[in-house]
Image: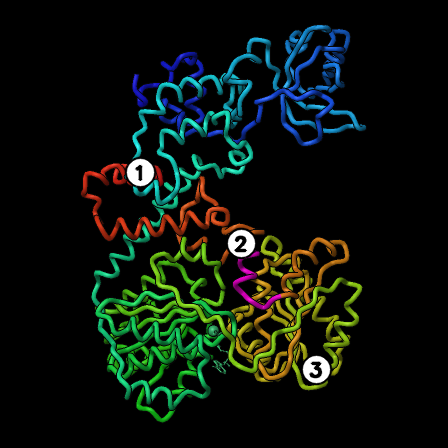
């Protein structure tokens, strides 16, 4: 029998069980090999009842002392209670749902072995729905005296039978699973070969560390983690190599260009900005397109870096495009770029849907005929009707707001591949960046411009609200401006709106002399933008908003931000919101309001915000708490759902997988060597199942 035959021929299966297994997706022994335990029970030793404590999952052996509740005297028995004693104590086994025949398995005075998780009820140990092992089973090395696998439920097959089937499958078929990685790879990853892993994952050896199996961190389990991460990194390595083969217009710089740009800088660059600029200039020289991700906290000064890159393009007589997610950000970039370029014969143009049709058409025409040197805009830039004469550099700001397709669309506007700089203010933990952006080079601005005063942050419960308002009053009296932010409750926009309206009223009452604006999700884009603009210009002094307002908008006069229901935000999101203040010369503060009820828990989770303003540390913490799915950009990135790997737990393995993928790709990009045949098969199989 081979691993690809029907599972029905495995000892003890037959057509009836085969059907039930098929319903679980298990058609062959090979499928069964990859049907893994969801947990493990350490049954290497039965434990005297006296030693039981809550939470242990162990076997106990004893005599049945009493059986209650299952008797025929009762109508519709609800609860079966069986008391077991072993001379050191008693434990009560309880079943809340059971087949009447269960009662028959117990006879007072007979020995029995039970295995389950211990709970304490009135200080006495209990087990709910424990597994019952017959004398025979209690002596069977499949179910007893070992670390026992616990499989996900297969409908219609009792757990013990599933385990028995798996035992047969593993015994007869595991060693036929050929290892796909050459020895040097396994060695580098520090994992055993596949067949050894499969055997151990189903039935760990007696000397194994049960806890490490439960945490999915045994070397044997890591073998699977590695395989999964490797295939992810291989795809990225391929993509990356594909880009390296493309050619692009090289944009070398010379001292003259650099001198001219330097003279126009309104401030000295920070060390981090200078380093990043150098990285970018080096890329631009190459005849291959740059693919660089620029990460830097809100306010770290990414715009000027983009401007420098655009100026280099301009000096070479080719076009640059800068794309931002909203009108107001595009406009802000446009103004900054235009003012920085003032006096130079460089033409900066704005292209957005908000322009009157005539102006829009005129801008499009200039972009087409090459009059425009730097085109700044929104999605409008990648519309079909837009054509560039010779686009050589694309910059995407707040890239997490754009999908892969939009990135591709911008690239598509150029005749030869353009250099691409994508910028994000969402600090992404390093591990996640490797997983997501393995195909990009990453630059980080990890230093704030001089003179920035860190935003003072406090978590405040409802009781402290008065103090917060007093502080707001003081700031407003000194000419400051304030943001009040409410979470956008997507499921119930209505409630969010009502909340926002009520908050705005409350603030108007508290500060009758201050013009207060309200922005919410129901408003049209233009209304939102105009509200934001009035706040920026000082016509409004307090802005109450659901989180619709773009974080990149620069209002240096804003010195206080109050975030309502802060517990509903992720840490990274809070950090982004906080970045709206602290952009000017005056010290700023951020108040994270939490309800009195959520007080303690929320305060504990949010307290890191009080301790650090380092976006990367906050992101790491967020990743630990919420996992990767919530990170901006993760969903759009097309990263497959990982089955075995956990990007937090397996950060080290991710790095190894990246290195191995890079090295292999360098040596044998098409996996033509005989030694890499297995890897090719492995990747092909994964690709096939991914398509499913
Ligand atoms: P972000 O990285 O969030 O896009 P910006 O580029 O908008 O940040 O910069 C935030 C503010 O800091 C802007 O007002 C900008 O002019 C200013 N800035 C940037 N770099 C420096 C610097 N090296 N020194 C002083 N101010 C700077
Ligand atoms: Mg910005």
Figure quadrant of the C terminus: top left
Q: Is residue 183 left or right of residue 272?
A: left
- Main secondary-structure element of the magenta-colored stretch: helix
Of tags 3 and 2, the one toward the viewer is: 2
Figure quadrant of the N terminus: top left
Identify the residue shown where x is 59% and y is 9%. 135
Instruction: Write down the residue under mark 3.
Output: 476
Instruction: Write down the residue under mark 1.
Output: 688
Q: Nearer the viewer, residue 330 or 531?
A: 330
The Cα–Cα distance between marks 3 and 1, rounded to whole angstroms, is 61 Å
Q: Is residue 536 left or right of residue 644?
A: right
Of tags 1 and 2, the one toward the viewer is: 2
User: How many C-alpha atoms fall within 10 Å of the one at disc 3: few (<14), some, or many (≥20)?
Assistant: some
Mark 2 residue CB less than 8 A from any atom of ligand 1: no
Q: Is residue 275 left or right of residue 677?
A: right
Earlier along the polypeptide chain: callout 3 or callout 2? 3
Q: Is residue 684 above or below residue 596?
A: above
- Residue 620 in the magenta stretch? The answer is yes
Instruction: Write down the residue under mark 2.
Output: 623
Q: Nearer the viewer, residue 633 or 312?
A: 312
Image: magenta residue range: 612-623
Secondary structure at badge 1 equals helix
Identify the residue shown where x is 28% and y is 88%. 256
Earlier along the polypeptide chain: callout 1 or callout 2? 2
Q: Is residue 431 above or below residue 534?
A: above
What is the x, y in percent for residue 428? 48, 60
């Amino acid at each position: 029998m081979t691993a690809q035959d029907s599972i029905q021929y495995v000892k003890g299966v037959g057509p009836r069980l085969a059907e039930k297994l098929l319903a679980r997706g298990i058609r062959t022994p090979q499928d069964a090999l990859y049907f893994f335990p969801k947990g493990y029970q350490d049954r290497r030793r039965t434990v005297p009842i006296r030693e039981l404590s809550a939470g242990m999952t162990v076997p106990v052996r004893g005599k049945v002392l009493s059986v209650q509740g299952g008797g025929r005297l009762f109508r519709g028995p609800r609860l079966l209670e069986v008391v077991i004693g072993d001379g050191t104590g008693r434990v009560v086994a309880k079943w809340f749902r059971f087949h009447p025949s269960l009662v028959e398995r117990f006879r007072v005075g007979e020995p029995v072995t039970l295995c389950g998780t211990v709970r304490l009820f009135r200080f006495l140990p209990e087990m709910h729905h424990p597994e019952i092992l017959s004398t025979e089973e209690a002596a069977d090395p499949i179910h007893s005296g070992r670390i026992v696998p616990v499989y996900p439920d297969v409908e219609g097959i009792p757990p013990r039978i599933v385990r028995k089937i798996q035992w047969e499958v593993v015994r007869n078929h595991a060693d036929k699973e050929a290892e796909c990685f050459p020895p040097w790879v396994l060695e580098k990853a520090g994992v055993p070969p596949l067949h050894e892993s499969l055997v151990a994952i189903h039935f760990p050896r007696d000397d194994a560390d049960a806890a490490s199996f439960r945490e999915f961190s045994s070397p044997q389990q890591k073998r699977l983690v590695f395989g999964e991460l490797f295939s992810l990194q291989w795809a990225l390595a391929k993509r990356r190599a594909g880009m390296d083969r493309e050619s692009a217009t090289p944009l070398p710089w010379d001292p003259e260009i650099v001198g001219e740009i330097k003279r126009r800088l309104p401030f000295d660059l920070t060390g981090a900005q200078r380093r990043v600029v150098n990285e970018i200039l080096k890329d631009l020289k190459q005849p291959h397109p740059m693919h660089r991700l620029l990460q830097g906290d809100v306010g770290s000064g990414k715009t000027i870096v983009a401007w420098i890159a655009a100026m280099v393009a301009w000096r070479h007589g080719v076009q640059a495009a800068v794309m931002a997610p909203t009108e107001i950000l595009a406009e802000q970039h446009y103004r900054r770029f235009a003012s920085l370029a003032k006096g130079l014969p460089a033409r900066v143009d704005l292209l957005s849907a908000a322009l009157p049709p005539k102006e829009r058409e005129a801008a499009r025409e200039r972009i087409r005929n090459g009059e425009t040197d730097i085109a700044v805009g929104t999605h409008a830039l990648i519309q079909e009707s837009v054509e560039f004469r010779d686009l050589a550099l694309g910059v995407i700001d707040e890239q997490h707001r754009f999908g892969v397709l939009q990135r591709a669309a911008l690239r598509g506007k150029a005749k030869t591949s353009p250099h691409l700089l994508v910028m994000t203010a969402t600090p992404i933990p390093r591990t996640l960046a490797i997983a997501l952006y393995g195909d990009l080079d990453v630059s980080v601005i990890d230093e704030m411009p001089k003179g920035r005063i860190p935003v003072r942050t406090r978590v405040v419960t409802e009781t402290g609200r008065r103090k917060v308002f007093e502080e707001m009053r003081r700031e407003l009296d000194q000419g400051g401006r304030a943001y009040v932010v409410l979470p956008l409750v997507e499921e119930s926009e209505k409630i969010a709106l009502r909340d926002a309206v009520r908050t705005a009223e409350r603030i108007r009452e508290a500060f009758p002399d201050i013009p207060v604006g309200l922005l919410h999700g129901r408003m049209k884009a233009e209304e939102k933008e105009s509200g934001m603009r009035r706040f920026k210009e000082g016509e409004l002094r307090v802005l109450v908003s659901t989180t619709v307002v773009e974080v990149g908008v620069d209002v240096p006069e804003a010195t206080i931000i109050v975030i309502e229901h802060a517990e509903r935000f992720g840490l990274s999101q809070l950090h982004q919101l906080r970045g709206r203040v602290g952009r000017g010369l005056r010290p700023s503060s951020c108040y994270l309001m939490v309800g009195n009820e959520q007080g303690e828990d929320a305060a504990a989770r949010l307290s890191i915000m009080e301790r650090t303003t380092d976006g990367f540390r906050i992101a790491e913490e967020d990743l630990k708490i919420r996992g990767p799915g919530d990170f901006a950009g993760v969903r759009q990135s097309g990263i497959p759902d990982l089955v075995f790997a956990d990007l937090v737990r397996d950060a080290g393995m991710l790095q190894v997988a990246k290195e191995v993928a890079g090295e292999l790709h360098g040596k044998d990009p098409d996996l033509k060597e005989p030694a890499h045949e297995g890897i090719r098969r492995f990747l092909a199989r994964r690709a096939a199942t991914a398509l499913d």
